[in-house]
Image (cartoon, grey):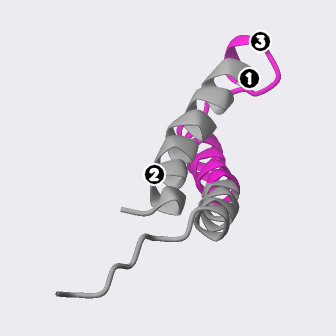
Amino acid sequence: MSAASYAAESGVVLGIVFVLLAQQFGYLALASLTTGILDIVIGAVIGGVLFGLIGWALGHRYLRNHPPDVTPPG
């Protein structure tokens, strides 16, 4: 798996956690089922995309600074 996919998975979880934390602090009201689920899904998508982009950029930078060791066969 790539750095982007690991970061996206973590971002989905953190997006859900941030929505639940915002609800605990009173910034969001998750009392209604439809808006609550919608807020959680939106938080998961935003977290996944944001952290996925960050992971992709960091993985790309790592590969640029640390090229794979290619040795000729034989």
Callout 1 amino acid: Ala
Q: CA distance from mark 2 to mark 3?
A: 28 Å
Against 64, residue 15 (above or below) is above
**Marks 3 and 1 in Cβ contact (< 8 Å):** yes
Query: Going by the image, does 17 lie left or right of 2?
Result: right
Q: Indicate whether residue 20 is drawn in magenta.
A: no
* Residue found 66% across the figure and 31% down from its top: 19
Q: Which residue is mark 1?
A: 22
Badge 2 local density, few (<14 within 10 Å), some, or many (20+)?
some
Against 20, residue 57 (above or below) is below
Residue 6's disc number:
2
Using the rendered view, name the quadrant where residue 18 is placed: top right
Q: Which residue is mark 3?
A: 25
Quarter of the picture containing the C terminus is bottom left
Residue 52's disc number:
none
Asked whether residue 53 is in view, the answer is no
**Residue farthest top in this picture:** 25
Dot placed on the residue nearer the N-terminal end, 2 or 1: 2
Callout 2 amino acid: Tyr
* Residue found 58% across the figure and 62% down from its top: 66
Nearest the viewer among 64 and 7 is 64
Q: Indicate whether residue 38 is drawn in magenta.
A: yes
- Residue 55, percent from left and from top: 61, 55
Callout 3 amino acid: Phe
Span of residues in magenta: 23-51
Chief secondary structure of the magenta portion: helix
